């Protein structure tokens, strides 16, 4: 039996908490099934069937569980379009790993989750990997983005780094690196780390339980650019304080953009030399 509207439901010890978090102020009195039916039909006959606000999506309001219930979890990766811009090497690897996994399916009707073939990893207009003709909504499977995952590693242009992707992802889940807390939708979006082009597609040997800690020689290692100005510069310019040259190695270079020489500081020469070793 559902609790009366406006009352807080109690959960027994060990039971799962509701997916909606305490910050959700949306009207949950609207039937979730009716919301999903409205999304599929495109109807808009009043508030009871109005689609959810994509900016406040949660699994209960923007994800269609009916596609997943009573069947194995399957992921459908869109086939690459012949007239579409070529995907970057990194995105091709992501799609290849998913397609080769045991969760992949070539039958869209079996899928619980969909991954577009359109490369959205780099939304920096100045990047050579930027796909200007990125179109997510052309496929009949798009359905407003419902049950889709859109990947993004970079957005905007240094030094300001606008968080606008330059495309409408609708109700899709966003798997993104450096995602700001202000736009992150808990339990719906996925926070990713940045990873290099050479990142392995498969893990190493399976870990042995109870084998104890492994001495790898280093506690923390970072090698990358430190921005002498712009967003992120305050944090990266302070990394050298953590570098002890032993088990913590933080190597940065000032070489970034066209104006780094004009804005370089007194540490740049030494940092660049250590970075190039």
Image: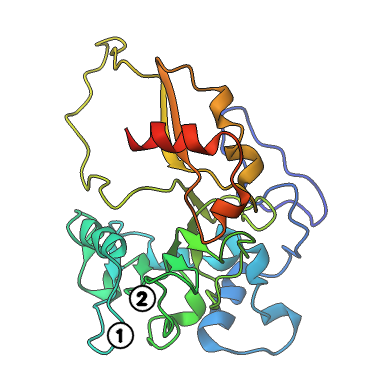
Q: Residue sitting at 33 percent across and 49 percent down?
A: 196
Residue nearest the observer in this picture, 71 or 159: 159
Dividing the picture into quarters, in which one does residue 35 lie?
bottom right
Question: Is 5 drawn above or below residue 78 in the view shown?
Answer: above
Dot 1: few (<14), some (14–19), or many (≥20) neighbours within 10 Å? some
Which residue matches tag 2?
A: 118
Question: Is 197 drawn above or below residue 160 in the view shown?
Answer: above
- Count up the numbered dots: 2
Q: Position of residue 109 (x, y in %)?
A: 29, 75
Q: Position of residue 199 (x, y in %)?
A: 27, 46
Which residue matches tag 1?
A: 84
For the residues bearing labels 2 and 1, Cβ distance under 8 angstroms: yes
Label 2 SS: loop
Q: Position of residue 132 (x, y in %)?
A: 44, 82
Question: Is 80 drawn above or below residue 222 in the view shown?
Answer: below
Question: Is 102 drawn above or below residue 81 in the view shown?
Answer: above
| Between discs 2 and 1, the one toward the N terminus | 1
């Amino acid at each position: 039996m559902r609790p009366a509207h406006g009352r807080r439901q109690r959960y027994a010890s060990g039971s799962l908490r509701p997916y909606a978090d305490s910050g959700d102020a949306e009207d949950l009195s609207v039937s979730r099934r009716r919301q999903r039916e409205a999304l599929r039909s495109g109807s808009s006959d009043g508030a009871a069937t109005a689609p959810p606000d994509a900016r406040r999506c949660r699994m209960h309001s923007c994800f269609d569980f009916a596609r997943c219930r009573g069947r194995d979890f399957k992921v459908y990766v869109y086939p690459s379009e012949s007239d579409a811009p070529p995907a970057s090497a990194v995105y091709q690897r992501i799609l290849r790993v998913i397609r080769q996994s045991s969760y992949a399916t070539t039958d869209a009707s079996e899928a619980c989750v969909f991954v577009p073939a359109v490369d959205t990893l780099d939304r920096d207009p100045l990047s050579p990997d930027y796909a200007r003709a990125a179109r997510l909504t052309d496929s009949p499977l798009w359905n407003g983005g419902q049950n889709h995952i859109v990947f993004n590693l970079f957005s905007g242009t240094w030094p300001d780094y606008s968080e606008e992707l330059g495309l409408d992802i609708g109700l899709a889940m966003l798997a993104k690196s450096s995602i700001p807390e202000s736009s992150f939708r808990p339990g719906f979006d996925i926070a990713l780390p940045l990873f290099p082009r050479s990142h392995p597609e498969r893990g190493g040997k399976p870990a042995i339980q109870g084998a104890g800690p492994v001495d790898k020689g280093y506690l923390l290692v970072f090698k990358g650019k430190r921005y002498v100005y712009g967003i992120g510069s305050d944090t990266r310019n302070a990394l050298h304080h953590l570098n002890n040259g032993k088990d913590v190695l933080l190597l940065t270079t000032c070489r970034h953009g066209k104006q780094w020489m004009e804005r370089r500081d007194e540490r740049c020469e030494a940092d660049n030399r250590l970075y190039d070793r």
